Image (cartoon, rainbow, N blue to C red):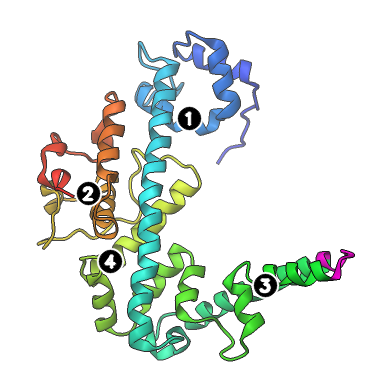
Amino acid sequence: MRTFDKPAIDIGEQIALLKARGLQIQDEARARHFLEAVSFFRLTPYMRPFQVVDDPQHGFRTGAGFRSLTRLYDFDRRLRLLTMDAVERVEVAARAVISNHMGPSRGVHWYLNARVFKHKYDHQRLLNTVREKQERALRDYERECENIDRLSNDERKSHLKRQRAHESYSRHYPLTYRNPELMPGWAMVEELTLGDLSHLYAGLAHDADRKAIARRLNLVAPLMESWLHTLTTIRNICAHHARLWNRELGIRPKLPEKPRFAWPEHLKTGTHKRMYPVLSILNHLMRQTSPHTSWDKRLHELLADFPEVDLRAMGFPPHWQDDTFWQAPH
């Protein structure tokens, strides 16, 4: 272990450092503007493909230019937006399929029953999460009512309070109902994070429930459980605007060995640890949740807009676009 001794340097010095390392910067004003909006530190991972391997001075390869870095950064940003668009739709659909099965089969407040879940599932944590949501919503409502009470128009006060009471279901329910204490299952699933939802699905005690829910997305239960887990990590990466394009997956999804649905040939064998399987998963799920989706078309267009990006770093096989999986009619 050694003492950290790197100085903080201003943007002019950052540009000088990049040039000293061999990066070509044709338009310093444009580079300065970019570094004002995107920090040097955030840009660092996008420099590595253009640097000499194992060079302790982080020198750039001959011909590497600043525009190449910004192009790669822009590609990754647009890839995150496209990925997040699909994850959002899948997340909403996952809430729906869980609620649409569990409510009719297990009752309106099904999640209050600990026997619906496995012994190892932290049922009390789920109840605490929902209770805290309601309590926080009530506190917010009470503060808003205090502000409303400062108004002089009494008729206006009542109207505004009624409006605020319906602002969210997590405040409407405890203001309206006393028993049960917590909101119904269809509202509860909307209050959970994708991570919480993933744990909830994995924690369901009955195989019949997990299988029935997975079938609604044309999946088997082990795949749905694994894919929700993986997509939780992908969502977090996107939400924090972190590097995605050449990410090595920490949580690798299970892949179907003998799929009963369209699936890339490349993913039927071998080990896959990059983004290609995630994009394939999203493409499958988008087709289940939105049959007329153009998401795969937008992926094709994005990759065509950045032909210089090395798709091997994302796990794409050669001629990937020729696979029937990526050509399936909608």
Please report whichever mark, 3 or 4, sits nearer to the chain's N-terminal start. 3
Q: Does 235 appear above or below 20?
A: below
**Residue 44: numbered disc:** 1
- Residue type at numbered disc 2: His
Marks 3/4: CA–CA distance: 36 Å
Tell me what residue is drawn at x 14 percent, y 53 percent: 263
The image position of residue 330, as x and y in percent, is 18, 50
Please report whichever mark, 4 or 2, sits nearer to the chain's N-terminal start. 4
Looking at the rendered structure, the secondary structure element under dot 3 is: helix
Tell whether 326 sits left or right of 29: left
Q: Are marks 4 and 2 in contact (CB under 8 Å)?
A: no
**Residue 272: numbered disc:** 2
- Residue type at numbered disc 4: Met
| Residue 118 shows in the view | no
Please report whichever mark, 1 or 3, sits nearer to the chain's N-terminal start. 1
Does the magenta stretch mainly form a helix, a strand or a loop?
Answer: loop
Nearer the observer, 326 or 330: 330
> What residue occupies the far front of the structure in this picture?
155
Q: Which residues are magenta?
A: 147-154
Please report whichever mark, 2 or 3, sits nearer to the chain's N-terminal start. 3
Label 1 neighbour load within 10 Å: few <14, some 14-19, many 20+: few
Please report whichever mark, 1 or 2, sits nearer to the chain's N-terminal start. 1
Tell me what residue is drawn at x 40 percent, y 71 percent: 199
